[in-house]
Amino acid sequence: MQREQISVFDIFKIGIGPSSSHTLGPWRAAQQFVQLLTDACALPQVVQVKVLLYGSLAKTGKGHGTDIAILLGLSGDDPVTFEVDQVDPKVNEIITSRQLVLGDVRPISFYKDDDMLFLFSESLPYHPNAVTFQAFLSSGKAISATYYSIGGGFVVKDGEDNNAKTEVDLPFPIDTARDLLIWCMKTGLKISEVVMENELAWRTEAETRAGVLNIFRVIKECIYRGCHTGGSLPGGLNVARRAASLNKRLTKGLPYSNYEEWVSVIRQSGDGFKNILDWVSCFALAVNEENASFGRVVTAPTNGAAGVIPAVLQYYIAFCDGFSDDKIIKFMMTASEVGSIFKKGATISAAMGGCQAEIGVSSAMAAAALTECLGGSQRQVLMAAEIAMEHHLGLTCDPIGGLVQVPCIERNTMGAIKAITASQLALQTNPDNAKVSLDAVVKTMWQTAQDMNSKYKETSDGGLAVNIPISLPEC
């Protein structure tokens, strides 16, 4: 039986940092609950709302901005369009006034300390990222719903089929890498071309191209902004932002005033190995520093791993003559299909699989995309994805202070470098000699995730999170 049908726009979503599973997902869940109340004609009758956070959402929710996201979602704000510089003022107003305008329609009293409960010792069986909303009505009745944030901004309502959304007639149904390769061999199409054919089942090619280029617009704006913003990250760890100072050193005072001119300056800065290595790190740091600052980012496939694919794409643009709409679309299409294969066969949620499910998957996606764009065969593309993930197997998620900062930000630089290395290895290798298939590594990753101790699954109960002494301010 075919698994969930996943579009390029399911893998790449525009949102606000710092976490797709702990910020974007709960935000979407809150919006869905407001819509549920609206559909039931109950919104005007609501007098109180309570929010119950379970498992990983409870343990690292404050560090990941889960509480902030839920308040904004309940207020009727959307993560794609909400102005990032209004996050703090809006949330502070709700907390200090003790009033929330539900769905931007129904004012209710909301005392965060009483009405939002972090149930640290409780977890629901379906997924560690669970949130229950309870609405109490003036009639004395109540409406309740539980949602699971399963990674990458995907949300599942308790009791509903994860695959229940309307299915389309895909010309090339794909669940595994083997399925993908078979279609490529039968048709002679490149992986990106197979993906585009499937996307046509949802919308026109013009609409798909425009949508992907809009995703790229957000990515390039995020990279550029991150490379020109200094200071420290919020949250109490006082982590210094490094991308801006690194960019300043690498550009060597050469003048530019926009992204396009900046790309030209990057090319002029030199193509030596150390220089390129520094630039790739700079690109990745920039995105994830923006993410940690509640900036506008794109899940790729998650927020915690949002810097890997942009960094490798920016490397392709700046150093491999990849600055054209067609090449960028090819890159994004290929990357999205590899991400879909991992989501169907394993997980893209760190709360389920550790950081291998986020940085590992994003590195595999980037490696595959770069390999296709550099002329690799379909089998070399899949080989590159396999190599990248193989060397992330077992990577734990142990964020210090529950913040998407240490070690998360630097891990994006490592994931990007590994992706480029994996691509180069695949391009120089005959895939006939490969010992491990992409499907085998997907299966292995899922088995590793199931074996991994829960301390290393985004709970901050193990690893660096308990071995680095910190003192965070009370929220």
Image: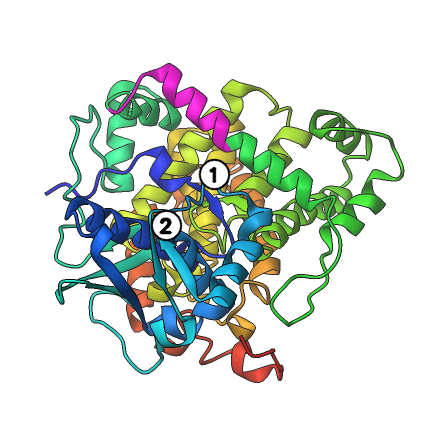
Residue at the image point whose x is 62% and y is 36% from the top = 221
Query: Which residue is disc 2 drawn over?
Result: 153
The kind of secondary structure element at disc 1 is loop
Query: Mark 1 and mark 2: span between their CA atoms?
Result: 16 Å
Q: Residues within 10 Å of mark 2 (few under 14, many from 20)?
A: many
Q: Is residue 53 magenta?
A: no
Relative to residue 216, is residue 22 drawn left or right? left
* Disc 1 versus disc 2: nearer the observer: 1
Residue 141 pos. (x, y %) = 12, 65
Of all residues, the one furthest to the left in this rendering is 1
Whether residue 117 is visible: no
Q: Position of residue 98 (x, y in %)?
A: 44, 67
Left or right side of 363 for 470: right
Q: Quadrant of the N terminus?
A: top left
The residue singled out by tag 1 in the image is 81
**Which stretch did the figure color magenta?**
202-215
Side of 393 where 227 appears, left or right = right
Predominant SS of the magenta segment: helix
User: Nearer the N terminus, badge 1 or badge 2?
Assistant: 1
Near mark 1 (Cα within 10 A), the count class, few <14, some 14-19 or many ≥20, is few
Kindly tell me whether residue 49 is visible in this rendering. yes
Q: Secondary structure at mark 2?
A: loop
* Above or below, comparing residue 380 to residue 388 in the picture: above
